[in-house]
Amino acid sequence: MKDGFIRVAALTPKIKVADPLYNKEAIVEKLEEAEKKRAMVVAFPELCITGYTCGDLFLMDTLLSQAKAALLALAEETNGRNMLVFVGLPIAYKGRLYNVAAALANGQVLGLVPKLCIPNYNEFYEARYFTPGMEDAVEVELEEGTAVPMGSRLLFCPDCMPELKIGAEICEDLWTPRPPSISHALAGANVIVNLSASDEITGKDRYRKSLVEGQSARLVCGYVYASAGEGESTQDVVYAAHNMVAENGILLGEAKRFGNESVYGELDIHRIEAQRRRMSTFRGHTAPYQEIRFHLRQEPLTLTRWIDPMPFVPGDKKERQKRCEEILSIQSMGLKKRLEHTGCRNAVIGISGGLDSTLALLVTVRAFDLLGLERAGIKAVTMPGFGTTDRTYQNAVRLVQCLGASLQEVDIKDAVRVHFKDIGQEEHVHDVTYENGQARERTQILMDIANQTGGLVIGTGDLSELALGWATYNGDHMSMYGVNASVPKTLVRHLVQYYADGYGEGELGEILRDVLDTPVSPELLPPEDGKISQKTEDIVGPYELHDFFLYHMLRSGFGPAKIFRLAKHAFSKEEGGYPEDMILNWLGVFVKRFFSQQFKRSCLPDGPKVGTVAVSPRGDLRMPSDASAAAWYAQVEQLEREK
């Protein structure tokens, strides 16, 4: 449960219809399995103590009394097991029969959650036996002198994680226009368990899966779906144990059907709560709920869930291509609107032969094509300086020519030397003034050419550079419209690769692929033996690490300690990743730079948002420029002491 993670399980025992005592033993076997795997919230299928397919046997006293006895025996089995268990059974109350999910822990029945929506159509005839459940809790006596609450408005809350609140619904409840889980979530439930007996017909699995994913997304919660399987009667239908675990729209685990396969997953409760805090619309009126508190022990948990090392880049090729096309469209449509609004028929862009300026030029070409403007109106300016290499220069020139833009070359070396002389800067002193003087000279040139031509200066800087402050203030930091402002560096590379694969025929594809192979560099220091001497990732760290830190800090609000744990798991050294010391070192660099460089982000030019993480001061990141990083860096220092 450290860092908000809790392991959950959806389990389907092989039962015998109408044999509660046998089924109790089958459930205990699954409990033992779940205990070994350290699952702390466990869900079994609907009516699993008796079987869902008992038919008119549900009306027999013998079955009901055995089911209650099996329930009490199962409750005793939870004594000493560090878990909350949900099992399904029929319960009689005041002359009516209810289909309930019983919550068990610490040797006790904590509460009973009845099914609210009773299906009575197609193959379902539940209304023949069951009454729709009550919302407000009533007291039900399971054995003499012991009563437990029964009602849908129950939440189960372990003492070891106060923020964890668990609600339950049963099968058809999810398929209705107003599932009870909506009220549960608005009342604070961040994990929903669903005890189900959903039979199989062709295509139903896809719809069922979409319901579970969609509900977990809509409610910003973890969703544990346990369904009936082998052992149920096949007189008219077949059950396939389609067990699933989802979190906020993402399926963490799904059973192979027709095998009673167990599904485990780690839910990130802190992430769920962080997402809810961000959503000003996640609110609503709901009736009071009864919170049932119980004891669970804090236990260490080794993560088995997959942590994506590239959260901005889809792993699936087809999905990645779709994402790239979508982002290019957002960027180009944003620029198209700006050009239309200003009446500009020209655009000015600095071309270095690097990834960012290449992407910005490709986007500008798209925008001009959408407007029906001649590409010659794109004034692509290459500005060789002290660090420019032949490789990047030639790629810049050839790229502009291939795309049909207008090429202009302005060598900045003499102008920068005059400036150095004016301010008393020695050219052999390769300090920050030496570097930034070149960057600001380039920006001045672009702005002046834009004035000459009545054009817009197109910004090339990306999201990762802005997060780290790796931009010269009032140099490459400034433009009239920044098309790459919310595109992280790891995604820039894939966008250029996508363009090369999909649109880069002949020489254009060759140039784009060489740009992709070129080390990322501002090229502000003289080359060594004709090659780039200043490699950005050697100075500020690997962009794939920084993009990972950025995503989890801004998207989920995580602190350095949790980000470090996730990064160790995502970038496991055994799988070709990074050593822990390296991850921690660059995490410290990220925290320091992110806070110290906010003043550059506070005055960013306009630019289109393309993803869920952005740093625009007018949108996603309203952060004071002088905010202290002490609380965040204290976590980094603590991690360093614990090494």
Image (cartoon, rainbow, N blue to C red):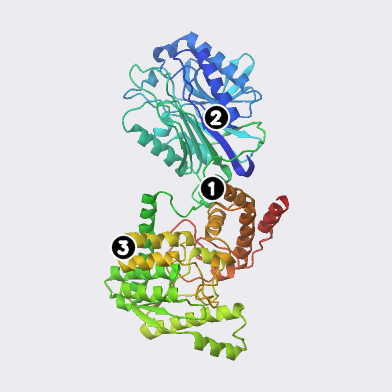
Q: Amino acid at mark 3?
A: Tyr
Quadrant for residue 451, please give it: bottom left
Q: Answer whether residue 632 is visible to the viewer in this image.
A: yes
Q: Earlier in the sequence, mark 2 or mark 1?
A: 2
Q: According to the image, label 2 marks what residue?
A: 42
Percent across and percent down for residue 125 are 36, 20
- Which label lies toward us, 2 or 1? 1
Q: Nearer the viewer, residue 270 or 404?
A: 404
- Depth check: give the residue in front, 314 or 236: 314
Q: Is residue 141 visible?
A: no
| Residue 462: percent from left, percent from top | 48, 66
Asked which secondary structure carries label 3, the reply is: helix
Quadrant in the picture for residue 198: top left
Q: Secondary structure at mark 2?
A: strand
Image x and y of residue 572, in percent? 57, 48
Amino acid type, label 2: Val
Q: List the residue tagged with mark 3.
A: 503
Q: Is residue 592 left or right of residue 263?
A: right
The residue to which callout 1 is attached is 575
> At x 64% / y 15%, what residue is drawn?
145
Q: Nearer the viewer, residue 73 or 533?
A: 533
Q: CA distance from mark 2 to mark 1?
A: 31 Å
Q: Residues within 10 Å of mark 2 (few under 14, many from 20)?
A: many
User: What kind of residue is marked 1?
Assistant: Glu
Q: Earlier in the sequence, mark 3 or mark 2?
A: 2
Residue at the extreme front: 529
Between the C-alphas of marks 3 and 2, the distance is: 50 Å
| Residue 13 image point, x, y percent | 49, 22
